[in-house]
Image (spheres, helix red, strand yellow):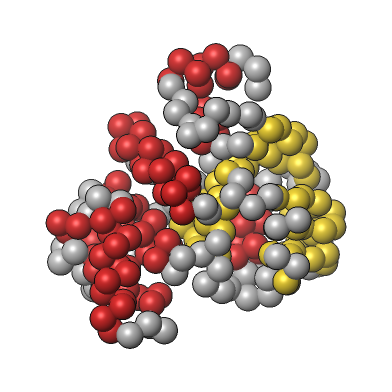
Amino acid sequence: MYLELNNVSKSFPHEEHGAWEVFSDINLSIEEHNFVSILGPSGCGKSTLLAMIAGLESITSGEILLEDQPVAKPGPDRGMVFQQPALFPWLNVLENVKFPLKHLSKKDQVTTAKNYLQMVHLSRFTQSYPHELSGGMQQRVAIARALAMDPKVLLMDEPFGALDEQTRHILHDELLRIWSEDQKTILFVTHSISEAIKLSDRIIVMGTRPGRIIEDLSITLPRPRVRTDADVIAMEQHV
Ligand code: ADP
Ligand code: MG
């Protein structure tokens, strides 16, 4: 399987109890080019799980394999987008997107960064600074920056949670286009059932205490996917 979690457990050190177990024995297999949404109540471990796949958080026990290789530390094969865009305020848009591209020549850094900024429709804003942009535009810069490394897997932690409805719809369409054109595998944490239905092939619902997967739903869609609001409302009745 493309991305595999085998008996993955996570505990944090805890003052009174010695250890605080967030979840134990999570097993999950994800196919390449799937768009998987993860839902669940606050505190069930969604962000921790994504951070572990990103290699930003250690694994207490079990293993996480990407194409049969353990994901011990962050790598260019996994891009991460957070709820807050976390751009460098002192760098302009182009410099922010170029930032993870240090391994390329100066010329290729610019070409690549401009390519991805075009993809998120920000070509006119390369010289702007983050504080000059709206929240939605900043999040598009963050998405361009994550994509610029050409990761195989895009890990998104409530990336549109802080945005208004209209901006969210625009970014949904952009993300679906990028997903289908670029053959990414996407893991997408969200609070919104309709967002999960609109975007994903598969919805995983996590529960809390103990943290575990309580639902795993596949959705079959016509491709290229165009899911209207009416489709989403109709499908909501079944989830
Ligand atoms: P979610 O994203 O589903 O809301 P999180 O993954 O952020 O949940 O958190 C899961 C649990 O792990 C929570 O109980 C949280 O308090 C705890 N937790 C997360 N990060 C840490 C940390 N660095 N140290 C201690 N506990 C943590
Ligand atoms: Mg979270």
Q: Is residue 177 above or below residue 73?
A: above
For the image, the number of numbered tags is 0
User: Which residue shows up at 58% across the image and 29% down it?
Assistant: 221
- Say left or right for 101 vs 136: right
- Say left or right for 109 vs 23: left
Q: Position of residue 135 (x, y in %)?
A: 28, 49
Q: Is residue 64 above or below residue 177?
A: below
Residue nearest the observer in this picture, 15 or 160? 160
Q: Position of residue 65 (x, y in %)?
A: 74, 65
Q: Report the quarter where the C terminus lies.
A: top right
* Quadrant of the image occupied by residue 206: top right
User: Which residue shows up at 41% across the image and 43% down it?
Assistant: 177
User: Which residue shows up at 46% across the image and 15% down it?
Assistant: 230
* Quadrant of the image occupied by residue 138: bottom left
Q: Is residue 17 above or below residue 194?
A: below
Instruction: Note whether residue 77 is visible.
Output: yes
